[in-house]
Amino acid sequence: MNVIIDGAKHILDPAGYDHILFLIALVASFDLSKVWRVILLATAFTVGHSLTLLLASIDFLRVDTGWVEFLIQVSIVIMAITATLGVSIDKSFNKIWAYCLTLGIGLIHGLGFSSYFRMHVDKGENILMPLVKFNLGVEVGQIIILLVALSLFSMGRAMGVSVRHQQIFVGGLALGLSTLAAVQKFPL
């Protein structure tokens, strides 16, 4: 059970606000009426996260963590620009693109956590069950964040905030913070 809680803490930790920024930028066009579509998008992220976390944890894939941390911020910048420009991932034409982009970003984010995960799995222990449990926790944490964000977005809509204003505010906030973080984490 601890591994599930660790996965949820990984996503919910305010110090790791990059995950939260990514998720709110991802759903900047949505409200609670689209909760299942949003959960599917979050699951695409978790699938990508799981794959690279597994490959890196078994030493099949090794990457420079400085570049990974930078690319995580760049991935959030991309999602924030998408939100700010008003690209609605809720339109049929963009659904496949949205799932692929979200999965790809999950691949990058999984690399960022692999060294921590590798340190917390006992040597010789089968990595599959801890990995499944950890990513289940990631999914639970994401759903909590998404439900809070979608609830706030729905309240905003009820108070007259347009989808476009929501996209600009959420995307702009995520863009500003992630751009600053990308500049700070650029590997020199």
Image (cartoon, rainbow, N blue to C red):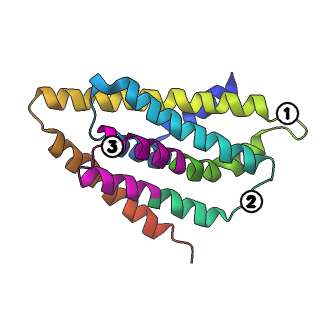
Q: Does the magenta stretch include residue 95?
A: yes
Using a 10 Å C-alpha cutoff, classify the residue at mark 2 as few (fewer than 14 neighbours), some (14 to 19) or many (20 or more).
some
Query: SS class of the residue under badge 1?
Result: loop
3 or 2: mark nearer the eye: 3
Q: In which quarter of the image is the N terminus?
A: top right
Does 112 sit left or right of 177 as displayed?
A: right
Q: What stretch is highlighted in magenta?
A: 75-104
Q: Position of residue 171 (x, y in %)?
A: 28, 51
Query: Which quarter of the picture shows residue 172?
Result: bottom left
Q: Mark 2 points at which residue?
A: 62
Q: How far apart are marks 3 and 1 (CA)?
A: 41 Å
Taking the image as shown, residue 108 lies to the left or right of residue 12, namely: right
Residue drawn at 52 percent across, 26 percent down: 140
114 vs 46: above or below:
below
Residue beneath disc 1: 126
Residue at the disc numbered 3:
93
Q: Does 105 appear in magenta?
A: no
Residue placed most toward the observer, 15 or 32: 32
Near mark 3 (Cα within 10 A), the count class, few <14, some 14-19 or many ≥20, is few
Residue found at the very far front of the displayed protein: 93
Is disc 3 placed on a helix, strand or loop?
A: helix
Q: Residue at x 56, y 60 (%)?
A: 69
**On the image, which quarter does residue 5 sit in?**
top right
Among numbered discs 3 and 2, the one appearing first in the sequence = 2
Q: Tell me which numbered mark, 3 or 1, is placed earlier along the sequence.
A: 3
**152 vs 72: above or below:** above
Mark 1 surroundings: few (<14), some (14-19) or many (≥20) residues within 10 A: few
